[in-house]
Image (tube, rainbow, N blue to C red):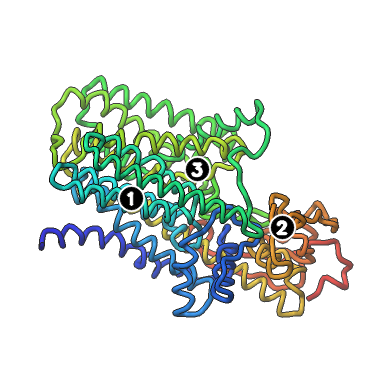
Amino acid sequence: MRLEVSRRLQALICALTLPLCAIAIKPFVEMGMNDDWSYIRTVQLLAQTGHVTYNGWATAMLGWQLYFALIFVKLFGFSFTVVRSSMMVIGMATAFLMQRTFVRAGLREWNATLGTLTIVLSPLFLPLTFSFMTDISGLFSIVICLYACLRALEADDAQSQAKTISWIIVAVATSALGGTVRQIAWLGFLVMVPSTLWLLRRHRRVLWSGAAAYIAGLATIGLSLLWFQHQPYSVPEHILQGSLGIANAVSVAQNFVRLAFDAPLFLLPLLLLFVLVAPSFGRVARLRFSLGAACAILFALVQGQRHKLIFWLAPYLGNYVTVYGLVDGTPLHSPRPIVLEFAVRLLITGAAIAGILALFATLRTSFKTPFHVPETTAQPSSQTLAILLGPFTLAYLGLLLPRAAYGELFDRYLLPLLMLAALALLRYYQARVRPNVPAISLILLLPVAAFSVAGTHDTFAMYRARLAAIHEITSTGVPPTALDGGFEYNGWTQIETSGYINDPRIQNPQDAYHPPQTTLPTLCTPFLTKLLPAVVPRFTLAFDPGVCFGATAFAPITYRTWLGPPITTLYIVNATPAPPAQLLP
């Protein structure tokens, strides 16, 4: 009993890192971030009416995430911060269960803890945990399914078939329900469960019981999709969004290359572990590693100097991690100050290249040595994990192909793949390099964690500054519809004014979409303005007072950041070429 508590203590520590980070981040702002304004509005209406009400923006079903947030709203009242706080609890549960899943998948306790912290403290997981986006909830659903499948495989013997069946049912039930928040999370149920049943196929009772549960899960998914399709102002999202051509094929290639180079950035603390063991390579391997790293870094340096901040220096995909900091998916009319300058981008690109080359060098040399930690019956074999996780990984990548074809592949979609990659790297490390990851790994993790915390802090500081500027304008009597406060604010204004986003993809009701009649100046058009006909701005926000139609008499807003310039200024500028008399508030 004491041993089990001690083991779970490390998982608890992983979970508690999130509220500790929240103390530094101060994740408080009463406006939307990225897409979560739409989801938060649905929670607000659910609390008021008792019904799930979509507003023409969500393509995710949202499902149980809405009802979990509703508990917080009923207890503490509605606010953006209260709704987002429910997501931190889900993030903590994900961190706890991920650590336990890694252990069940064969990692030692400390190695599993490091792997979990690498994901949890990454600049993807951390800011998403303090928003109301669906990525963390979707990951949580996948982790539950994987954990249940591993427990089912552990109970694989003739005497405990009932226990095996119970875990299969848990995997089916939690994944079928969990996927209602983010449909791609259903891949856990659709792919992992059949893979588990294949591994358990010699037990007919387990196989037939699992098949029956699987059919029930398929029925649940079908009914959920049918329900979502008939909801007013839900937005259907087909796998293929239009015709395909050569340009789409090129887009797939470009985006998957970016994905392949972006993923190592979020696993740097683990990849750099292999750089630390480079001195133990043979002379030829050390020479190959050194030459490869030098050539790659020299190429990046030359090309980067020639083209400055061009695409072959990290980061690559964007949306959450960009050269301007974290969460820059819907920018204002002028870009935020650059945080990741050329030298920093070169450094992290070089570190990622060195980590990848060191991993390849280790792969070439380590198979000549015996296992440090032999695989035993107490843990799933590498072959078992390959059968369990390989089809899921391929299916997940397959569903990303259409996104890549239309240029909508974002870095946050990497989270489930990063979790599996961390597991694979650490399984290999403890088997072929050292049984335990060295304590210095925490030093490798520290810069990434610091960047994630500081970047998330700066994101909230920026949004609070935007909200302060908006209040400065509206306090003079300017209506919200005459203000471009950024897409998140404009989206909230649109649904408060008209009830829904004016998206042509809405099929229910059929006459919902109305082509915009208002013509706005092309010099300062709001982001996705065709979806927001209620917003006809006179004023807008920018980091440069000279953009659009110049500065107004409104005072600028300043805020402090931890990355980039310590003081950043946000200006209120004219969105239309108004006469001089109208420039004053």
Residue under the point 38% across and 54% down: 140
Across and down, in percent, residue 490 comes to: 69, 63
Left or right of residue 484, residue 231 in this image: left
The residue lying toward the viewer, choosing from 220 and 318, is 220
The residue lying toward the viewer, choosing from 59 and 354, is 59
Q: How many marks?
A: 3
Which marked residue is nearer to the observer: mark 3 or mark 2?
2
Pointer 3 residue: 315
| Residue type at tag 2 | Pro
Pointer 1 residue: 171
- Disc ID at residue 509: 2
User: Which residue appears farthest toward the left when viewing the image?
Assistant: 2
The residue lying toward the viewer, choosing from 125 and 134, is 134
Residue under the point 21% across and 39% down: 380
Badge 3 or badge 2: first in the primary sequence = 3
Which marked residue is nearer to the observer: mark 3 or mark 1?
1
Give above or below for 75 relative to 127.
below
- Which quarter of the rendered picture does the C terminus lie within? bottom right
